[in-house]
Image (cartoon, rainbow, N blue to C red):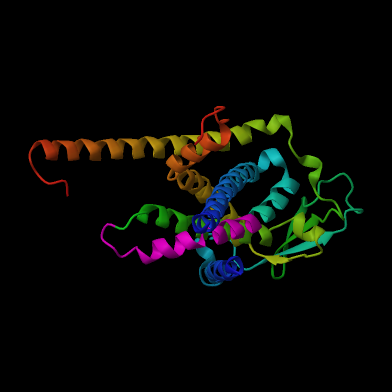
């Protein structure tokens, strides 16, 4: 009886972790596709580009919030001589800066989404247009690095999520 | 509750980056927009006046007393979805996909090579009778 009581929360925790892993995997996959589409401004047209950009801005806040534990943990370990994830931490920091400035400059130079929402920014200099182009190019280099540095996790989870379990075999 | 606490921390970090960006524009705008000085005044013209133009189209750029003035079509209440997903522009998407795939492949190959090299060096050290670390 006691062991059953003890086992129940453990099983729940396992299920929660699995659900969280699934959420991370699919949320990040959608984010990558949305980013690629938003970057391809010439393909999507300005409307989709701007609305998608705004959505990505909000999704990034959620993405960072979901991984905030990792940020705190890794930042605390940065001064250790053989601390793990230093490169990933640096890439992520650069990506945070570039992506935030990209969304910010995109909002400031918006020609469709913001006017549609009744916001008209009429004193915006060429600085923000250039900043938008520059940060977009930087993010195009950093996003795939950010993804690739976790390729083992992606392959492992992707295999588990995308392949059907063989009947009669427990994992 | 934990999510909201973390979200607040994230918002704070993002706010710091935003303030940094605004400071960059204020103190060092010439580093990016060298030729231009000061803001460009944008005049939004209601969509009804300029028919047949996609929203956001700049229709005139003229010098003003306080810098250039851009006259553009605000497009009324259009969501700007009339120019989306043109098949003729598909190469733009492929270009982005190719760059991403290329960078991912390069990083993965480098990571595999680095791990194999480390394993090889460790094995050699063990065979020579040294310690692992």
Q: Is residue A116 above or below residue A166?
A: below
Q: Position of residue A80 (x, y in %)?
A: 28, 63
Q: Is residue A150 visible?
A: yes
Front position in the image: B132 or A51: B132
Residue most toward the front?
A1
Side (left or right) of A59 relative to B101: right
Q: Is residue A131 above or below residue B27?
A: above
Q: Position of residue A72 (x, y in %)?
A: 44, 65
Q: Position of residue A141 (x, y in %)?
A: 48, 45
Front position in the image: B19 or A150: A150
Residue most toward the right?
B48
Residue shown at the point (75%, 48%) measured from the top left? A47
User: Is residue A73 on the magenta stretch?
Assistant: yes
Q: Position of residue A50 (x, y in %)?
A: 71, 52
Residue shown at the point (35%, 40%) measured from the top left? B111
Side (left or right) of A109 relative to B127: right
The image quadrant of residue A123 is: bottom right
Q: Which residues are magenta?
A: A57-82
Q: Is residue A37 above or below residue B67?
A: above
The image quadrant of residue B67 is: bottom right
Residue shown at the point (17%, 36%) measured from the top left? B123
């Amino acid at each position: 009886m006691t062991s059953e009581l003890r086992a129940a929360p453990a099983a729940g925790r396992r299920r929660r972790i699995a659900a969280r892993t699934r959420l991370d995997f699919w949320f990040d996959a959608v984010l990558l596709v949305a980013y690629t589409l938003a970057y391809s401004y010439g393909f999507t047209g300005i409307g989709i580009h701007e609305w998608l950009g705004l959505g990505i801005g909000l999704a990034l806040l959620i993405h960072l919030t979901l991984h905030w534990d990792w940020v705190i943990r890794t930042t605390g370990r940065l001064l250790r001589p053989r601390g793990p994830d230093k490169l990933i931490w640096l890439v992520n920091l650069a990506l945070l800066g570039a992506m935030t400035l990209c969304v910010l400059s995109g909002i400031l130079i918006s020609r469709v989404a913001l006017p549609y929402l009744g916001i008209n920014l009429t004193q915006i200099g060429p600085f923000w247009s250039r900043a938008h182009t520059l940060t977009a190019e930087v993010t195009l280099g950093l996003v795939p690095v950010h993804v690739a540095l976790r390729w083992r996790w992606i392959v492992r989870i992707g295999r588990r999520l995308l392949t059907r379990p063989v009947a009669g075999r427990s994992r | 509750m934990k999510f909201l606490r973390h979200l607040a921390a994230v918002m704070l970090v993002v706010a710091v980056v935003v303030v940094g960006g605004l400071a960059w524009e204020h103190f060092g705008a010439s580093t990016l927009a060298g030729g231009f000085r000061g803001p460009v005044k944008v005049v939004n013209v209601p969509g009804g006046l300029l028919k047949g133009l996609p929203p956001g189209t700049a229709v005139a750029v003229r010098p003003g007393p306080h810098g250039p003035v851009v006259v553009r079509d605000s497009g009324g209440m259009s969501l700007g979805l009339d120019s989306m997903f043109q098949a003729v522009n598909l190469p733009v998407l492929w270009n982005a996909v190719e760059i991403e795939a290329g960078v991912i492949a390069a990083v993965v190959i480098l990571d595999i090579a680095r791990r194999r090299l480390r394993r090889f060096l460790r094995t050699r050290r063990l065979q020579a009778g040294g310690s692992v670390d």
